[in-house]
């Protein structure tokens, strides 16, 4: 399978964004000893910056890399805004840096403020749109049978992201700015020892909220796309299993209508294929026999004037293959169950198969 270049770019950006936002938790967990150490290092730097050692400066940055954090948040915000499933498509062709900054300001686009250089770098990268991911998918999967393999690979990649998404739950305007929380408390303490200004705190929180929203929007869009692909794959699961000799239908059941209804039932999680080649039906034997009667024998719903209800009428499209169906579904006597429901109101759960019947009519 070919390399999923743009898909991997998108995944990498989202993973980096989650990692950067997670660093806010590291800052919020600074203890009193570390805060005191930061204050002493900061005071020494202010007084003797010319003689401040590289090791001390590195230690201060390890504890609280303020400028590096803001630069990375700015970069990520620009990536999501302009390049990764972008909110805004902005073309910088034939424009210099000053012209672009002026144009962004005039049009109320994201500029990055004093960190505009990070935005400028992002604007020179190629965009990755949702259509790009779909186009890349169809290049990698030229036929429907390739979808399952593609989804296995991407599922692992995106599950790694989903496992970390709960970290974003607190990153809302109300949580960060209004409610008492560990993030606000730590940054306020950093402000009191002059390590950060109120404007910088506001900037960090605003960027974090924007990035958290972008991650969620991106994941929802990508998830929707993959669910669509998954459904396409599941629509063909019976034919796929048969072609790979993983599953065999009895000759009495090998009809287009029965296979079509089975595919739809699998898609709705009403039917599952067991490892031993049998099928599992999530319902009573009465409902299963009803399903099979409609699929194989032409059974139908008819209005009964006497009882004034819809009843099941026996079809005339062939005999009900009792033994093959019993073996296929690991059931005991589906033929008897079918006989018991004819000329009667449909069994409980019939609404679960009614849409399948209508779609296959």
Image (tube, rainbow, N blue to C red):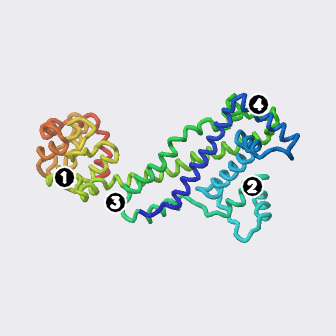
Q: In this view, does 173 lie to the left or right of 344?
A: right
Which residue does the numbered mark 2 point to in the structure image?
111
Which residue does the numbered mark 1 point to in the structure image?
249
Circle 4 or circle 1, nearest the eye: 4
Residue 233 x/y as whole percent: 36, 55
Q: Is residue 145 above or below residue 357?
A: below
Give the numbered dot on residue 145. 3
Residue 226 x/y as whole percent: 45, 52
Question: Quick check: marks 1 and 2 in contact, CB under 8 Å?
Answer: no
Disc 2 crowd rating (10 Å Cα; few below 14, some 14-19, many 20+) is many
Q: Is residue 116 above or below residue 209?
A: below
Q: How far apart are marks 1 and 2 (CA)?
A: 62 Å
Which residue does the numbered mark 4 point to in the structure image?
36
Residue under the point 64% across and 55% down: 79
Image quarter where the N terminus lies is: bottom left
Residue under the point 54% across and 53% down: 11
Q: How far apart are marks 1 and 3 (CA)?
A: 19 Å
Q: In this view, does 230 lie to the left or right of 287?
A: right
Circle 1 or circle 2, nearest the eye: 2
Circle 1 or circle 3, nearest the eye: 3
Q: How far apart are marks 3 and 4 (CA)?
A: 61 Å
Q: Which label's residue is closer to the chain start, 2 or 4?
A: 4
Residue 230 x/y as whole percent: 40, 52
User: Quick one: SS at disc 1?
Assistant: loop
């Amino acid at each position: 399978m070919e390399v999923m270049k743009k898909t991997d770019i998108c995944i990498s950006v989202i993973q980096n964004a989650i990692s950067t936002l997670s660093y806010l938790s590291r800052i919020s967990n600074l203890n009193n000893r570390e805060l005191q150490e930061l204050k002493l290092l900061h005071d020494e730097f202010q007084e003797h910056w010319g003689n401040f050692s590289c090791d001390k400066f590195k230690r201060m940055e390890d504890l609280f890399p303020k400028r590096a954090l803001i630069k990375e948040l700015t970069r990520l915000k620009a990536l999501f805004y302009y390049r990764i499933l972008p909110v805004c498509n902005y073309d910088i062709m034939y424009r210099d840096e000053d012209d672009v900054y002026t144009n962004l300001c005039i049009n109320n686009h994201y500029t990055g403020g004093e960190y505009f250089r990070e935005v400028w770098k992002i604007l020179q990268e190629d965009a990755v749109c949702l259509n790009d991911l779909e186009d890349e998918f169809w290049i990698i999967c030229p036929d429907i049978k390739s979808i399952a393999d593609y989804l296995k690979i991407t599922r692992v990649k995106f599950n790694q992201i989903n496992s970390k998404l709960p970290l974003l739950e607190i990153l809302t305007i109300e949580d960060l700015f209004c409610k008492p929380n560990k993030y606000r408390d730590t940054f306020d303490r950093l402000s009191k020892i002059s390590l950060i200004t109120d404007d910088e705190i506001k900037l960090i929180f605003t960027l974090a909220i924007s990035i958290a929203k972008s991650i969620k929007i991106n994941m929802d869009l990508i998830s929707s796309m993959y669910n669509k692909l998954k459904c396409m794959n599941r629509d063909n699961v019976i034919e796929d299993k048969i072609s790979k000799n993983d599953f065999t239908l009895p000759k009495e059941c090998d009809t287009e209508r029965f296979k079509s209804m089975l595919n739809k039932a699998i898609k709705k999680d009403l039917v599952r294929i067991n490892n031993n080649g049998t099928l599992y039906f999530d319902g009573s034997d009465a409902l299963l026999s009803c399903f099979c009667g409609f699929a194989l024998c032409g059974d139908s719903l008819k209005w009964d004037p006497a009882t004034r209800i819809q009843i099941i009428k026996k079809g005339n499209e062939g005999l009900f293959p009792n033994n093959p169906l019993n073996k296929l579904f690991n059931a005991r006597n589906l033929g008897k169950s079918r006989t018991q429901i004819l000329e009667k109101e449909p069994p409980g759960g019939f609404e679960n198969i009614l849409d399948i019947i209508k779609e296959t009519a």
